Amino acid sequence: MIELIQFPWSPFCIVQRRILEFSGTRFKITNIPNGDRSLVWRLTRERYYGVPIIRDGKSVIFEVSDDSQVIAKYLDSNLKLGLFPWELEGVQSILWRYIENEIESVGFKLNDVYWREMVPEADRMRFLRHKERKFGRGCLNQWRAGKQELLQQLTERLVPFEEMLLYKPFLLDHRPRFVDFDLYGMLGNFLYSGHYRLPSAHSQLKDWFRRMTHIQFDSIRNHENNRVLPPKETRQLPLRRRNLQNA
């Protein structure tokens, strides 16, 4: 059984957790304190201390750079989910970098405003120390004071995704691909505290988020298996080919 090692509100953990839920496979979740990565350090043989990681039998899978998608591609390949089709490889690579920089960098700050509600008391000192060492002393108070400005930034940065969803149920296709799960994770982190809602102006995004919350791979596979192509002789050829055949 696959084991996901995480802490629950991490945007990157939400991505992998939702992919596993979507797949329908049985998996186990192990939550670790934000300030204690000793389990990760031990399982990766002192090569990695971030989250998430997954353990699948004797294999331990983790990222190798800020822009890698090692875990998602491992799950996609092993579970045959169709999240990384070759024809979308380039555009997905562009999109996930935007998602994991421009969206994540605002969403996590808004969620961290309510850090005391999420972080167990025993781990609060280590959490605060980690944040202030990385972002500067008083950063959490600064984010709280600038909450409205951060919300406006997030609303503006989500506009391209609202536009993409005007004509399709998912970002790139008739079914979810990796970037759908990636954006879902960043927004899941933003919404984790329960103090926010998706921007009211983005109605398509709100509908998409509901779809992403409930969709299962089996429903897609059944739909694709039941698609019936018209008989060969009645299919329409491209105009140029029809003209050549009739010449």
Image (cartoon, rainbow, N blue to C red):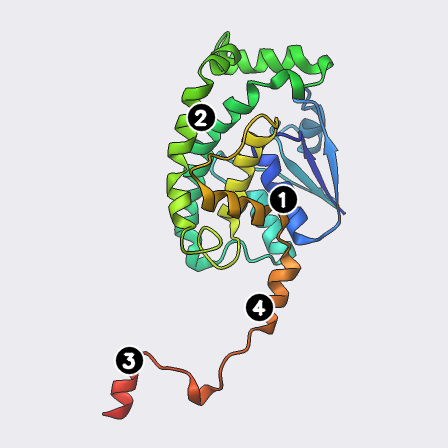
Q: Nearer the viewer, mark 4 or mark 2?
A: 2
At horizontal 48% and vertical 52% (from top left) the residue drawn is 170
Element type where label 4 sits in the image: helix
Q: Which of marks 1 and 2 is in front?
A: 2
Q: Are marks 1 and 4 in contact (CB under 8 Å)?
A: no
Q: Which of marks 1 and 4 is nearer the N terminus?
A: 1
Q: Name the residue under label 4.
A: 224
Nearest the viewer among 221 and 158 is 158
Q: Give residue 218's quadrant in the image.
A: bottom right
At horizontal 55% and vertical 28% (from top left) the residue drawn is 196
Label 4 is placed on what type of residue?
A: Glu
Q: Residue 36, relative to residue 136: is it above or below?
A: below
Estimate the spatial distance between the alpha carbons at disc 1 and disc 2, rounded to whole Å.
24 Å
Q: Are marks 1 and 2 in contact (CB under 8 Å)?
A: no
Q: Which of marks 4 and 3 is nearer the N terminus?
A: 4
Q: Mark 2 points at which residue?
A: 151
Q: Earlier in the sequence, mark 3 or mark 1?
A: 1
- Residue 239 is tagged as 3
Label 3 is placed on what type of residue?
A: Leu
Element type where label 3 sits in the image: helix
Q: Residue 155, relative to residue 184: is it above or below?
A: above
Q: Which of marks 4 and 2 is nearer the N terminus?
A: 2
Estimate the spatial distance between the alpha carbons at disc 4 and disc 3, rounded to whole Å.
27 Å
Q: Residue 101, relative to residue 90: is it above or below?
A: above
Label 1 is placed on what type of residue?
A: Arg
Residue 95 percent across, percent down from the top left: 41, 44
Residue 134 percent across, percent down from the top left: 50, 16
Label 2 is placed on what type of residue?
A: Leu
Q: Mark 1 points at which residue?
A: 18
